[in-house]
Image (tube, helix red, strand yellow):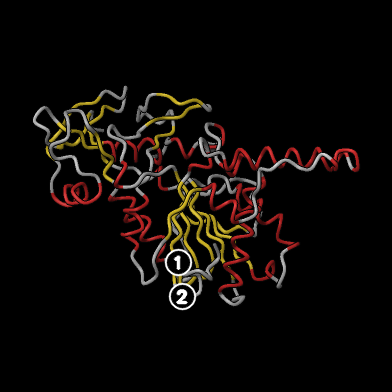
Amino acid sequence: MREWSGWRAAAERALYGTEGFFRRAEGPAGHFRTSVHASPLYARAVAELLGRVDEALGWPEELALVDMGAGRGELLTSVLALAPGMPHGRAARLRLCAVERAPRPAGLDGRIEWHDTPPDGVTGLLFANEWLDNVPVDIAETDAAGSPRLVEVRAADGTERLGPPVHGADADWLARWWPLDGAEPGSRAEIGRPRDAAWARAVGSLRAGLAVAVDYAHERAARPPFGTLTGFREGREVRPVPDGSCDLTAHAALDACAAAAGGERPPRLLSQREALHALGVDGGRPPLALASRDPAAYVRALSAAGEAAELTDPAGLGAFGWLLQPVGPACAGPGGPL
């Protein structure tokens, strides 16, 4: 192994190599908490969105839910538990597909398929919750002359140094989506070209339906001047070191991903707070009258309201970006699922 490499190669080994972070038995849930782990309300919202996609598509013979970056299958397991109550015979038409580079976890329900790439030609909902932020990317930093250069990193301890100038397709991407030329020395950018390609492939696997990417995100007009690369270990943010001991994550340029996927139908970008409110997740407190009429129901409703508030908190999970990319006319426009 080379002592020094770009961040993309280093993160690829650290996250997905033989002993990589995402191949460990405990799974990512042992180190960080996503919306899926925060509350069952999130899975219900996804199930609600799936139902709206089903209706928009005219109740197809097979309805797929493809979970990109499925972890240990937590989201699909929760949606599967809701299947018996789904209308229009949806449970019998449902195809659940987990997409994850780690091996299939022991004990996962046999009705959930396990893939390392999204299955081609499916109809339904492709949902990518905190997937794109773990697609490794290279990092550029401006030198003393204000010119972008690749950042090289030493895997053993995370020490960095400036490498060669950014050129070719990466330089073109920076110029369009995250301009650095002339920026003050030390300014950084995460070169999102691999994420654009990954998202375009994922969207392209749908025959018809809706693709949704959910992540901490930023847009061209407000890129963070020093980037967002960080690490997580055992629930705490740590210095990013590509040695396999921690998660390595950087926010996604969802506007660039949307453009790369293209398509005839325009994508939409909105916040998780907006999306979940539209799907019926409300953090409002239950009426006090319920406490005297049915104390147990009041406690349950109060708990659900607290979970909903966490999922939609504009200073927390509610600040996630949702990229909605329709495939085909049925899920596009004002009459679409969301």
Q: Farthest residue in the right direction?
A: 293
Residue 157 is situated, as x and y percent measured from the top left of the image, at 32, 22
Q: Are marks 1 and 2 in contact (CB under 8 Å)?
A: yes
Q: Which mark is residue 98?
A: none
Q: Height in image: 1 above or below 196?
A: above
Which residue is at the front of the view, 331 or 47? 331
Q: At x 42% / y 36%, what residue is drawn?
A: 20
- The residue lying at 31 percent from left, 36 percent from top is 224
Which amino acid does the dot numbered 2 rest on? Pro
Q: Is residue 63 above or below residue 41?
A: below
| 192 relative to 118 in the view: left or right | left
Residue at which label 1 appears: 326
Q: Position of residue 29 (x, y in %)?
A: 56, 36
| Residue occupied by mark 2 | 329
Note whether 125 is above or below 59 in the view shown. above
**Of helix, strand and loop, which one carries label 1?**
strand
